Amino acid sequence: MTQKKKLATLCVQAGWQPKNGESRVLPIIQSTTFKYDNTEEMADLFDLKKEGYFYTRLQNPTNDAVASKIAALEGGVGAMLTSSGQAANFYALFNICQAGDHFVTSNEIYGGTYNLFGVTLKKLGIECTFVSQEASEEEIDKAFRPNTKALFGETISNPGCQILDIEKFARIAHKHGVPLIIDNTFPTPINCRPFEWGADIVTHSTTKYMDGHATQVGGVVVDSGNFDWDAHADKFPGLTTPDESYHGLTYTKAFGKMAYMTKLVAQLMRDLGSIPAPQNSFLLNLGLETLHLRVPRHCENAQRVAEFLAQDERVAWVHYSGLPGDKNHALAQKYLPNGSCGVIAFGLKGDRQTAIQFMDSLKMIAIVTHVADARTCVLHPASHTHRQLSDEQLREAGVAPDLIRLSVGIEDVDDILADIRQALDKI
């Protein structure tokens, strides 16, 4: 029996297995199309009777190798790369929702996702109900309707840094016969594998830690293969009834545990086309090769910074689950025993202008609309990423007006602390 590879080995080796004489490094197949010798071979590909490549909008060897690596890291049966994390969340839900459907989501989610769910999907006839992830199971149960198709949450919320009780959410979802979809961007599979706690589908913005160097925008959807779509066939007709665009093929009958992923690629990506360029996937793969080395350093540095902030009299509050006094510390010990991520949420004593003055005084740490890469960076969500939300919506999403999101990088922590200290001295 072959020994199961550890995460560090999968980061480096999974996805691309070159044959004799082939490129040792994953090649960039920068081609839109692929040649075949006869019509029948290509016809079989279009009818999903055979696997292969014919057009990069559906599948590409470079993209597929990287998707396979991420599936291995998460412990899933398959994965599909998308052109952004936002696209990944859209595809994950739209694959099982249509006009007239409904889903439930934690309100502790990224501002862009909040808007996607609450505004844009509503225009497509898909409604969602936002719930507090800290509410009781009984309270969250009340949000479900007969037409509810999924439950959604973030392992670690962006930017509030709240930890999701994955097992609780999985129990609720499965009680109602729907899958639990988890955005696992911040901890990455190095620090948390949601499938092991009952989640069914995982998404990532690969733009963040997976890439780690801010060189490409991307996303991924990973399926555990564990959700029994046929057991709830009436809820998921797109998977359990014939697809006329493929001559009446039924995904669950034809593809078993790969039903969800096959529909995702063959139907949604075919029609909507939010693919990453092979060049971007190549860059993402370079980041994945060091993910297991970078994530522990991010956590180590962030722990030091969080402890410093918590002890500074000019700081009003700090949210970082690695701090023993943090309200999420117990959940973090359960789900994230090796560390959470490098992102810290904190507020300064004063007003909004105090936060702005602090950030404008930083020298090495940059103000950027990004998070979770090798360089330490900072953002004021109420002024930037979440500025489309009202004050009430901000509070519901766990974003205080004074919240500063600090993404601690992998530089020397003493240099990071020195820059924070000198900026604090200027407020």
Image (cartoon, helix red, strand yellow):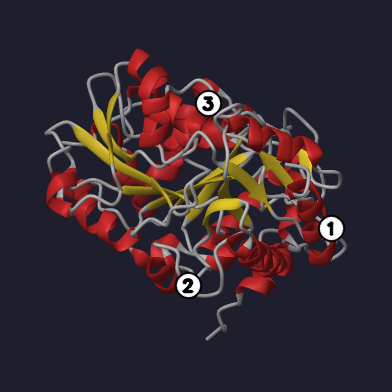
- Asked whether 257 or 402 is in front, the reply is 402
Q: Describe residue 120's horizontal placement relative to residue 280 as left or right.
A: left
As shown in the figure, which amino acid type bears the numbered disc 3? Arg
Q: Earlier in the sequence, mark 3 or mark 2?
A: 3
The residue indicated by pointer 3 is 270
For mark 3, does the 10 Å Cα neighbourhood hold few (<14), some (14 to 19), or many (20 or more) residues?
some
Residue 231 in percent (x, y) is at 17, 50
Disc 1 secondary structure class? loop
Q: Earlier in the sequence, mark 2 or mark 1?
A: 1
As shown in the figure, which amino acid type bears the numbered disc 2? Pro
At x 45%, y 64%, the residue is: 326
Q: What is the CA distance from the residue labelled 2 to the residue labelled 1?
A: 43 Å
The residue indicated by pointer 1 is 25
Q: Quadrant of residue 404?
A: top right
Asked whether residue 48 appears in the rendered view, the answer is: no
As shown in the figure, which amino acid type bears the numbered disc 1? Val
Residue 21 in percent (x, y) is at 88, 63
The circle drawn on residue 324 is 2
For residue 196, above or below residue 182: below
Disc 3 secondary structure class? helix
- Asked whether 162 or 271 is in front, the reply is 162
